[in-house]
Image (cartoon, helix red, strand yellow):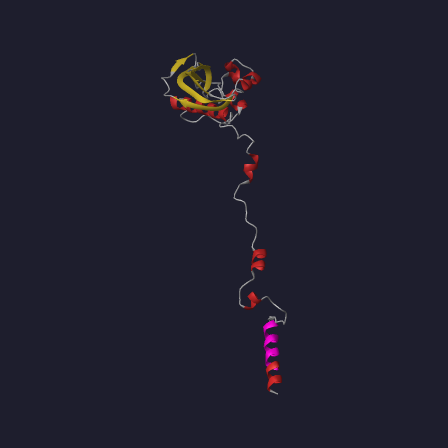
Amino acid sequence: MKRSAAIAILLAACSQQNQQPTNNTGQPVEQADANGVAPAAIANESTPPPVSAQPDEATNASVPPPPHVDPNAPPPADEKSALGAARRLQEYCDAVATKRYRDAYSYWGDGGKRSGLTFEQFRASFAKYGAYDCHIGKPGDSEGAAGSIYITVPLQVTGALTKGGGFVLEGPITMRRVNDVDGSSAEQRRWHIESSGLKPRP
């Protein structure tokens, strides 16, 4: 009898260990649920996938940014100043540096014709530059003539050539804008590049 009783107690203990817990509906649940903690697998399924921090615009990195200035927008109040001329020259340099050659061409007077080049020639002239960085000096005094204002701005350009090696260009840039005369357009009253004295330096 003692041996039979011991066997019965052992079988009962094993049955309790193998019994799976159930919820209020009698359905079996994971052991972690019974302890009030969601299983790892369930937690991972309920967690939404991480959202990429990289904006969609990054996929369009090859698309050039818009022009700095709308040609039809009125010139700013300080457009007549030497600072305004230097700022426009910096915008031109930014356009070249970012390979927005159509914009850069428009910063030359007379719709780009003051560069002495067609747009195709103008664009081709920058093919040898892999990097183009401008350093603008202090603008000179303004001079007036024939209804226009002229300011000379010292410019140094440094960078890298596509075939390797660096380069240095230095020289004066003459900026011109039409004075506020009757019949002049907003575009004519902006500073444009009239001429360039950039030359290679050792």
Front one among 34 and 132: 34
Asked if the stretch drawn in magenta spans residue 176, the answer is: no
Residue 131 in view, yes or no? yes
Q: Is residue 51 above or below residue 110?
A: below
Extreme residue in the bottom direction: 1
On the image, which quarter does residue 1 sit in? Answer: bottom right
Query: In percent of the image, x 59 and y 56: which residue is there?
Result: 45
Q: Is residue 118 above or below residue 32?
A: above
Front one among 195 and 40: 40
Query: In percent of the image, x 57 and y 67: which residue is there?
Result: 31
Q: Give the percent coordinates (x, y) of residue 72.
A: 51, 26
Q: Give the percent coordinates (x, y) of residue 195.
A: 46, 14
Asked if the stretch drawn in magenta spans residue 11, the answer is: yes
Query: In percent of the image, x 58 and y 58: which residue is there?
Result: 41
Quadrant, the C terminus: top left
Please, what is the dominant secondary structure of the magenta stretch?
helix
On the image, which quarter does residue 175 sit in? Answer: top left
Query: In percent of the image, x 56 and y 68: which residue is there?
Result: 34
On the image, which quarter does residue 170 sit in? Answer: top left
Magenta stretch: give its range: 8-18
Instruction: Indicate left or right for 104 with 28 as reference.
Output: left
Front one among 8 and 172: 8
Residue 79 in view, yes or no? no
Q: Give the percent coordinates (x, y) of residue 2.
A: 59, 86
Extreme residue in the top direction: 146
Q: Give the percent coordinates (x, y) of residue 92.
A: 47, 23
